[in-house]
Each structure stands twice: as structure tokens, then as C-alpha cells.
Image (cartoon, helix red, strand yellow):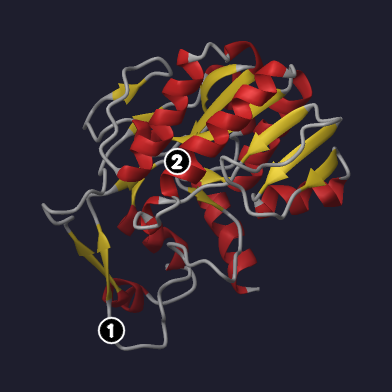
Amino acid sequence: MELRVICGTFWTRRTVDSKKFNLKIDFNELSTERFFSLADIDVVLYLSVVHQTNKENPKLVEINTQVPTAIAIECQKQNIHFIYMSTEQVFESQNDFTYQEDSPQNAKTIYGISKSMTEKALVLMNLGQNTTILRSSMIYGYKNDKKKNLFNHIDWSSIAPYSIYSDAYTKPTFIDDLCECIDHVIENKITGVFHTVGNEMIDRVSLLKMAFINKYSKEAVDYFIKPVKTPPSSDIQKYINIECSPIFKMFFKTTLKEGVMKQLFREFK
């Protein structure tokens, strides 16, 4: 099976090591005018993304919406399976509510809106028979020296505490579990819209304390991790709950505590 991968460093390295699929990787800059040839391709997994943390990037809409939509149209013409990684942020924050796969979308962040636009475009153009949309939450468990994450941005040698939002919740999704899920989708050409997330909802302060309480003293953890409320002006979505789709629950078996320990081992070994 020939598979084209755009970005997705962890998944790509893992797949190269396992030799599970034959990869064709294109390192050229993508645009709506120029993207890779689809000759001899069975599956396109679109992982390229501009995140909310880089919302001022002028290419956000192009990379998150225009390019994947254009590629999906070409995939449909050539009967190629197209997989698009999306996000729970196609919905808005709503306490004590669980969004379903077919719930109406009401994104409030630029990032979420760009992802929602793509999802709606794929549905509007009736690309369902060859298209898979996988919505996830905060993905963790990988090390990227060029990118800060929730676990490695604290400088424990400094004297200044770090303000962490205590009222912002997420469903951390262990990257190894997500990769197994993606492999399953590819191998079985599963199409449709699905939620692929971890099973535990947690706030950021509790997540960090869970991670570092065995590495540093309780006094140090309590000092460096300073709980604060999200400011009224913030566009952070504090509580978006999606449940893993039943068809994929078997893959998300890593508990949050297990996943956090693996994250720290990879981050600081």
C-alpha cells in the first residue's frame, strides 16, 4: 500500500521503523496551486496543521482548510482514501455536555473555525465514501526539540513560578494509541467522522502536578505551578467534551498516568 504523509513526525518515524506501509514523503512547500502527485497512491493522510498557538500565521486558513480540501477533491476523483485529522475545537466550550460525531458545529477559535470549514466542505461536496475525519484533543507522548509543550516549557532551575490555567480542561490523547488507530483506519479503509481521544478529562494544573509530583518535591511543584483562571479576553475553550467513538475505544487503552510517565521518559531521558 502506498501512503503519502504530510508532516506528522512521530507517526512517520514510527511507520518507517515498523515498515508497515510504503511511504512517499514530499518535503516541498504545499499550496493550493501546487501539491504532490497522486500517482500510485492508495491513501493520503493529511497531518499538516497550523495550531491555535500560531493563530497569527497568514497561512493558517490555507494549510488547515484550502489545501486539504483541494487534495480531498483530487482523491475523490481518483478513488483515493483521504484521512483528515481534525479537533474537538470545531465545537465551543460547554460545561456538562458531551458532543457527538454529528453534533452541530459552533467553533469559536480561529483554529477551530479553519478545521470546521474543512469538515463542512468535505461533507458538502459529498466526499464521504473516500474520506475519514478523525477529531482528537491534546496529543501528548512525543518529544520534539523544536516545539514546546505543556510538559517541557517549565524551567525548573528558574525562580519564577508558571501561571497555568486551572479551569481549562482537555482529554489528553496518547500519541501511540492514536497512531495505532490511524493504522487501523488505513488498513481497513474506514470512512466517516469519528472521535479519537483519550478517556480522561483533566485540567492543566492537575495534569502537570500528576506529571511532576514523583520527580520533584510537593513544595517545588506547588511553587512552580501557579493555578490561575483564564482571563475573560482569552479565546481558550475551557471545556469541550467528546467521547471516543465506540469503534476505536479498543485502541485508547493507555491510562493518563501511564501515558504521562512515558511522556516524561521520552522528554527527559
Q: Which of the 4 image quadrants contains residue 38?
A: top right
**Which of the two discs, 2 and 1, labels the residue nearer the N terminus?**
2
Measured as percent of width and height from the top left, residue 258 is found at 57, 51
Task: Label 2, secondary structure: give it.
Answer: loop
Nearer to us: label 2 or label 1: 2
Q: Which of the 4 image quadrants contains residue 269?
A: bottom right
Question: Marks 2/1: CA distance?
Answer: 29 Å
Q: Which of the 4 image quadrants contains residue 69?
A: top right
Q: Which mark is residue 137?
A: 2
Outermost residue on the left side: it is 232
Q: Is residue 65 visible?
A: yes
Measured as percent of width and height from the top left, residue 13 is found at 76, 54
Task: Label 1, secondary structure: give it.
Answer: loop
Q: In this picture, is 76 found above or below 228? A: above
Q: Which mark is residue 129?
A: none
Q: In this picture, is 110 found above or below 159? A: above
Q: In this picture, is 21 found above or below 189? A: below
Q: Residue at x 29, y 42 (%)?
A: 109
The kind of residue tagged 1 is: Ala
Q: Residue at x 32, y 23 (%)?
A: 105
In this picture, residue 194 sits left or right of residue 155: right
Measured as percent of width and height from the top left, residue 117 is found at 40, 29
The kind of residue tagged 2 is: Ser
Labelled pair 2, 1 in contact (Cβ < 8 Å): no
Front residue of 22 and 182: 22
Categorize mark 1 by other alpha carbons within 10 Å: few (<14), some (14-19), many (20+): few
In this picture, residue 268 sits left or right of residue 43: left
Q: Residue at x 66, y 18 (%)?
A: 76
In this picture, residue 207 sits left or right of residue 106: right
Q: Tell me the quarter of the image containing the N terminus.
A: top right
Q: Which residue is mark 1?
A: 160
